[in-house]
Amino acid sequence: MTTTPSGERDPFADAWTADKLMAADFPDPKWAVPGVLCEGVTLLAGPPKVGKSWMSLGLGLSIASGKPAFGTVDTGPAAPVLYLALEDTARRLKTRMGKMLGDQPAPHLLTLVTECPPLPQGGDTAIAGWLRGNPAARLVVIDVFAKVRGSAPAGVQQYDADYLAVGRAKRIADHFGVAVVLVHHVRKATHEDFLATVSGTNGIAGAADAVLVLERGRNNADGVLHITGRDVEEADHALSFNPDNGAWTMLEGPAVDHTASDTRRTILFYLRENSGSTPAQIATGTGLDAGNTRKTCQRMHEAGQLTRDGTGRYFAPLL
């Protein structure tokens, strides 16, 4: 062990030189749901009654059964899952799960818990104990995080308290190399940046490895899942929700294809085939009203749905 002149452990003992870091080999991150849920702490936030619990239980069932998540994303072999349903009773859980399973057998690899002490008062120890007994586990869901975060230490600022609270869950995730999903709420106020909607201070989202925000959908989508994080690519996915079985399904193509109005979709589809067109050319090629096309292109540009060059030609984002 490297020590300082005072005999204390050198805090930089594990430092890398750039050449050694570039020559090192590290294992790839482990995924619970490829492209969506990676090992580490993920916040799953959304407004009340938007379907967060249906989504999180559905993910648990998919991974514990070895079936595709969101109906389309391969999750690999079945693996143990721990689901803390802290706002439910066993009876309600059984009813919800029965609706989701239909005539399919319930997976024995899914462990369901309706009570757990706060993380600082033994909850983290209980979760760690389950993970030690299930070393192949790929997912832990805490629904909802507020039930286990515990009280803020006296004299600690709210940002620091939020960061510490998520940090307790992150230590579990990092130690066991497992995805831990914290179901959380969003603010009532609307923001252009979906990260700004996460309830609490920036310490909540800042301490997490990834943030998923489930937003109510528009037009042909029942929901939109916004994703950002350290190991996941930033993305928006349009989703459909089946109220008969509580299943969220990921729709093909860019989210805007499902959430935009008919006029905007027509413009998008035209520009993908005729990149660099003017509003007049778009109107001629699609049969849309010229004035409305010009205004809609401008609004789509302001919303980030189209780009525009200095000559007034518009371009659709690359797929």
Image (cartoon, rainbow, N blue to C red):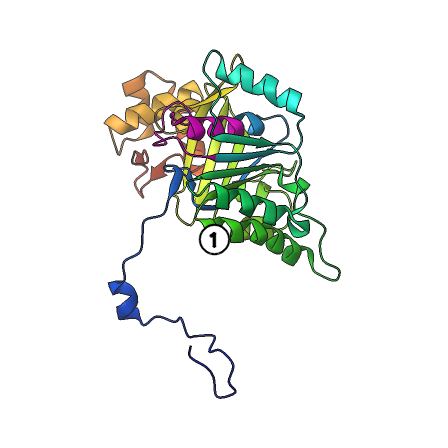
Q: Residues within 10 Å of mark 1 (few under 14, many from 20)?
A: few
Depth check: 283 or 67 in front?
67
Image quadrant where one finds the N terminus: bottom left
Q: Position of residue 260 (x, y in %)?
A: 44, 24
Callout 1 amino acid = His
Farthest residue to the bottom: give it.
Answer: 5
Image quadrant where one finds the C terminus: top left
Q: Position of residue 13 (x, y in %)?
A: 41, 74
Q: Position of residue 317 (x, y in %)?
A: 32, 36
**Above or below for 31 versus 263:** below
- Is residue 135 magenta-colored? no
Is 282 positioned to the left or the right of 89 in the image?
A: left
Q: Which residue is found at the position 29% from the left and 24% from the top?
A: 270
**Above or below for 318 versus 96:** below
**Can residue 119 be seen by looking at this rendering?**
yes
Residues in magenta, as a range: 55-80
Q: Which residue is labeled 1 in the image?
A: 175
Q: Which residue is found at the position 26% from the left and 69% from the top?
A: 19
Which picture quadrant has residue 271?
top left
Depth check: 84 or 189 in front?
84
Is 260 positioned to the left or the right of 169 in the image?
A: left
Q: Which residue is found at the position 64% from the left and 21% from the top?
A: 92
